[in-house]
Amino acid sequence: MSDSLTPAVDEQANARAQRGKPTPGPTMWSRLGGIPHLGLIIALALLAVVGMVTVPETFATGSNLVSVLSLAATIGVITVGVTFVIIGGGIDLSVGAVMALASVWATTLATQSYGPVVMVLCAVLVGTGAGLVNGLLISYGRMVPFIATLAMLVAARGLAQRMSDRRTQLVQQANQAIVDMSTTRVLGLPVLVYVFAVVVVLGWVLLNRTTFGRRTYAVGGNPEAARLAGIDVRRHTVLLYALSGLCCGIAAVLIMARTTTGSSTHGDLYELDAIAAVIIGGTLLTGGRGTIIGSILGLLIFTVITNLFILNGLNTSDQLIAKGLIIVIAVLLQRRSLKSVT
Amino acid sequence: MPPSSSDSASLLMMRGIVKQFPGVRALDGVDLDVRAGEVHCLLGQNGAGKSTLIKVLAGAHQPDEGTIVFGGQEVRLTGPTAAIRLGISTIYQELDLVDGLSVAENVFLGHEPARLGFVGQSEVNRATRELLTGLGHGEIRPTTEVGRLSPAAKQVVSMARALSYDTRLIVMDEPSAALAHDEVANLFRIIRELTAQGVAVIYISHRLEEIREIGDRVTVLKDGRTVAVGLPAKETPTSQVVSLMTGRNVEHVFPPRPRPGSHDGRPEVLRVEGLTVPGRVDEVSFTVRAGEIVGLAGLVGSGRSEIVEAIYGARRADGRVILNGSPVRGGSPSRAVRAGMGLAPEERKAQALLLDQSVMRNISLSSLDRYARFGWMNRSREASDARRQVEELGIRPPQLDRPIKNLSGGNQQKAVLARWLINGRKLLLLDEPTRGVDVGARAELYAVIRKLADEGVGVLLVSSEVPEVLGLADRVLVIREGRLIHQSDARDLDEHHILDMIMEGRPA
């Protein structure tokens, strides 16, 4: 009697497991759901096939792989931070602007005079500081995340323009160490790709192996339950946005390395790419669910599409249309698989 | 029960209505007869099936068995629209008005008089004004935003909405709960005018004095069944009504209690002094000793949940909360948890569970720091602790990685208790711990709660079900309208006593 619900669930699961052949519809999707991110991996593989068929001489080359990964690295680091914020039930629209501000602040003549280490520290601190402000406004100022970070987007861009006088600031010869991150290669890959990889690994560990990660899922999944279970939801929310800001600071260093500049125009619309990558990766915008790996796969899909369009000499408008379609298709497919599981 | 189907004046006749939900039979053969032009009162304890019955009448639930005859014809209420089209309107306890819309827009929401798809605003306003004037509230302007109205005025707007349809039967679920005394008088005047026009009213209230004043006949529900049909509302003595509502079959198996007075020497775990939540709780003081289960009895809205929330810091309050001799600063559940409290909240799914997550993660939620060194989770220790709880409490199925939403209500609640068992609480606050839990699992929960108390935990228990408070608690506090009106050993009280006190404010 007390278990009246559970046997039925068991039977369903058994039936699903025993049926050898995948039947069409929901059952197939739930089977696919058993292997994490299989859909994303297949999509990525399909794109690779498209690349090898349409532009065989340029796509599958080492230099193309390097350019795809370098391109992905900057937004990738941001995507890790945004994944945390979204799993925690929030949203961060300010990431691109905060990265731009951090890049400008780190490349002012004053900052550059202290050398590359201080430049990196500066970028990271500016990013974290902006994230902290976001978090405080949302947690203790009780602002809606969308609005608080939208305000930060506008204000950070404005501040970046003011600091730089709307001029692009070059990384000086003396601070060449920053630029070396994109030119120096280890085992064929530029250093900034390794920075990206380290951020992803640390992000994964933080989300899956620490109390911080557990709290993130709890706060996003059911903030009231988290609060009543004794979790300090406000403090955790502040930390989540600070973490996102920290990622923006790291991304600022990477973009300085890649472009040799700091500029108020850096990272325009990065927030949309990062959020789209997170959504394609299967993280729910309502919070409480999602993975770092999914987000990174989502981002790679996006980057490879961009790459394919460029290699095929197609125009950027079509590229945007394709990306829009990908978002819609990804979300529709996820909804089907979600439904079959619940 | 002799069916009075020969009664040709019946506007509504329900026979043998059965409604089954997973794990609980909410309606188990209900009969109801309502005549045109009468005020028919529906009485019953919480969980007796009143809400389910009116949802069936409103077309919101489909009955599994039984027949409904309305206006001489058998009908099927397939949805809210079908019910309204027949002339059945329902005014719910939580008024379902849209705060952001105007009074007139609310009244005609969903059936705006429209010409070619355009809503004639002046026409809507005029019709609304007419309805409000008819209700004796011409002062409410049709263009006012509903969110700015007082609860009493909102009630009137709800009533106007019910009347904006061609209504023959109005169901009112606790319409007086939000009203002051003189506003109730106006409500009654409106009801009398309606019945004079031949409209029938089904009136649900816990206040017996109101039922005597406005009611014609009474139907009593108990455990999803009709136990009395058409009693005269004015003449039936209170004692008879209360004993019809109570005296349920012994279906709760309560664990044995320690001897009276055995807690006397035990230390105080909780001392509450002058706890006040403005407008909700008024100067409540009491204590809970180690190993003692203290029950809070009271109606929904009496302030009992607010007391629990205030102690836990989930709600701002004045007064002092002292745990194990040291005061706990309010306003923060995480502080309360660090001090040694635990809460099983009223709304399990909304307030306690991470539905998508595993049983294990739901159990360890409040103890993450116990399993971590510098933030790094020791997952094997977490799993072994959770597994021990799953085994000891008999959580079924005994799988740690199953999403908790796939468990039955009783097993979910056990997981919530396990959350606090793994980190050794001094005081547990249990708000409606057996809501939505079937009978078999209830007995298990009772045993767990008693075992906790025997291990020295102080327990404060809130329940709408008087037999539960009486059967489980050592001491009972009776709350009425935010005040503590009585406390005594549970053995010195019976269900009758307590119901008298919480419904009529009569001391034992």
Image: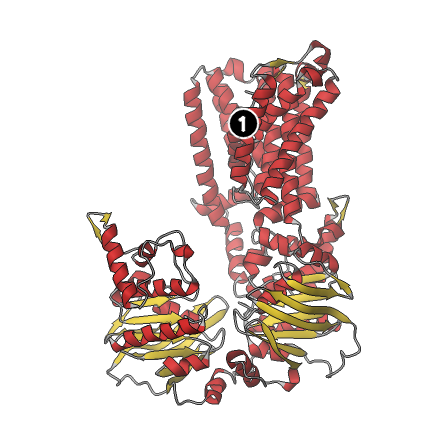
Which residue is the extreme one toward the left?
A: B116
Indicate the position of residue B197 as horizontal and vertical percent values: 24, 75
Q: Quadrant of the N terminus of chain A?
A: bottom right
Residue at (34, 60) in percent of width and height = B140
Residue B106 falls left or right of residue B380: left
Indicate the position of residue B72 as horizontal and vertical percent values: 23, 76
Q: Considering depth in this image, is B497 or A159 the residue closer to the camera?
A: A159
The chain carrying label 1 is A
Residue at (68, 54) in percent of width and height = B334
Residue B221 appears anywhere in the view? yes
Other residues around mark 1 within 10 Å, as few (<14) / some (14–19) / many (≥20): many
Q: Considering depth in this image, is A20 or B348 the residue closer to the camera?
A: B348
Q: Considering depth in this image, is A264 or A246 the residue closer to the camera?
A: A264
Which residue is the extreme one toward the top?
A: A173
Q: Quadrant of residue B408?
A: bottom right
Mark 1: amino acid: Tyr
Residue B231 falls left or right of residue A246: left
Q: Is residue A243 above or below residue A337?
A: above
Q: Considering depth in this image, is B216 or B482 the residue closer to the camera?
A: B482
Q: How is the image coloured?
A: secondary structure
Residue at (77, 79) in percent of width and height = B264
Q: Which residue is mark 1?
A: A270
Q: Quadrant of residue A209?
A: top right
Q: Is residue A61 above or below residue B429?
A: above
Indicate the position of residue B206 as horizontal and vertical percent values: 46, 77
